[in-house]
Amino acid sequence: MTMPNRRFTLTVALILLAAAACLCSVTTDDGASASHTPARKRVMPWMCLERCGDNSTSITAQLHALAQHRELISGVSFELFNLGAEGTLVANNLTQVLPFLQTAGFKTYPMISSYPYPPQFLDWMRYVFDNPKPFITTCVQTAVKEGFSGYNVDWEPASGVPTADDAKRYAHFLTEFAEALHAAGKELTVDFAGWSTIWDYESLNASKADRLLCMGTYTPNFDSFLRQFQKAVASISLDKLGIGLETVNESENNRPLTDQEWEERFDMIIAKGIQEIDIWKTPIPDNMWKFIAKFVYSDTFASSA
C-alpha cells in the first residue's frame, strides 16, 4: 500500500539528532547509566500523536525524551493504521515518526486501531475473520517494505455485542496473522481488556500472538488495578503478558499519578515477575522514569510457579 503524506514530517536534522542520542552515553535523571546494554525486560510506550491533540512541537519533544532514555525503552508503538471496511488497511495522515524511531534504534510497532470506534467495526472484524488472507498479506508486505518490527493490534468494538464465537474467531485470526508475520521475521502484539466479550483471555493466551498487552490495568486506584492485574496474571502466560499503565488518572481530570501510586503498582509488577510494561501514553511523566528504571534492572524474573 502507499503511505500517505503526513501533516508534519520529521526533518533530516531530527533524524540525525536521534542517531546522536543513540551514540552518546547519558546519565538520566533517574540515575541509570545510558550504556545501551539491551534490557532484559521490555518497556513499550504508545504515541497517540494528533489523535490525542499533539502537534509537531509536542511530538518532537516526546521523541527526544524517548531517545534520551533509550536504555530503558525496548520498543515504541504509535498511531498509524486502521482496520477499514472489507478488510482494508487504512493509513492515516498523522505525523511520520517512524524514521526517527528507526534511526534511534527502537523496535517499531505501528498500531492498527479501531479509533474513532465506528458502529460498524465489529462487522469489519467479522469480515476479516471470514477473509483473513488479503488483509494479512497487505500487512506483511507493508511491514517488510517499511521495516516495521511488527504491529500492535488495538481492536475495540465499542458497538454491538461480540459473541463467544466472535472471541474464538478473533483469537484464531490472531494466530493466522502472527504466523504470517513470523514467516517474515516480524512480531504481533495485541491489546486486550475485560470490558468487551471480544477478549477471551484463555483463547488469546493460546494464540500465537507474541505479546498480549493488558489495558484493563488503566485504573484510577490501586484496588481496581490489583483486581485487573490478578485477572490477567491468572490467565496469560507471563512471558507473553504486558501490563498496561496509564500516565494519568482519567477519573480525576487527568491528574498525574503520584510517586506513591507509581510505587505500589511497580512493586506489584516486579514482585510477580512481569516481563513487560506498556505505557499509555507519551509524554512519560518525569516522576515515572525512576520506577521504569527500577523495573528494567530488577533481578526478579518470571518463574514457572
Image: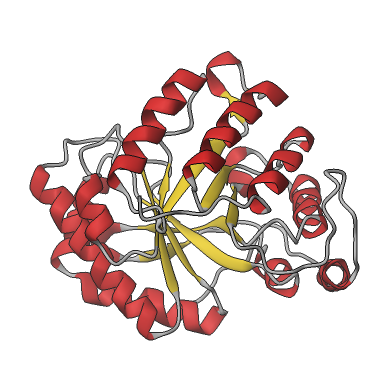
Observer-nearest residue: 91 or 223? 223
The answer to whether 142 appears left or right of 258 in the picture is: left
Indicate the colouring scheme: secondary structure
Tell me the residue at 63%/23% (across/down). 261
Determine the residue located farthest toward the top in the rendered image: 252
Observer-nearest residue: 165 or 275? 275
Q: Position of residue 92 (x, y in %)?
A: 51, 58
Query: Quadrant location of the N terminus?
Result: bottom left
Q: Is residue 99 above or below residue 292?
A: below
Tell me the residue at 46%/27% (across/down). 225
Observer-nearest residue: 283 or 234? 234
Q: Position of residue 105 (x, y in %)?
A: 71, 72
Q: Position of residue 78 (x, y in %)?
A: 57, 56
Tell me the residue at 75%/61% (across/down). 71
The answer to whether 261 appears left or right of 175 in the picture is: right
Q: Report whether residue 100 is seen.
A: yes
Q: Is residue 156 above or below residue 67?
A: above
Tell me the residue at 56%/68% (across/down). 4
Q: Position of residue 189 (x, y in %)?
A: 42, 60
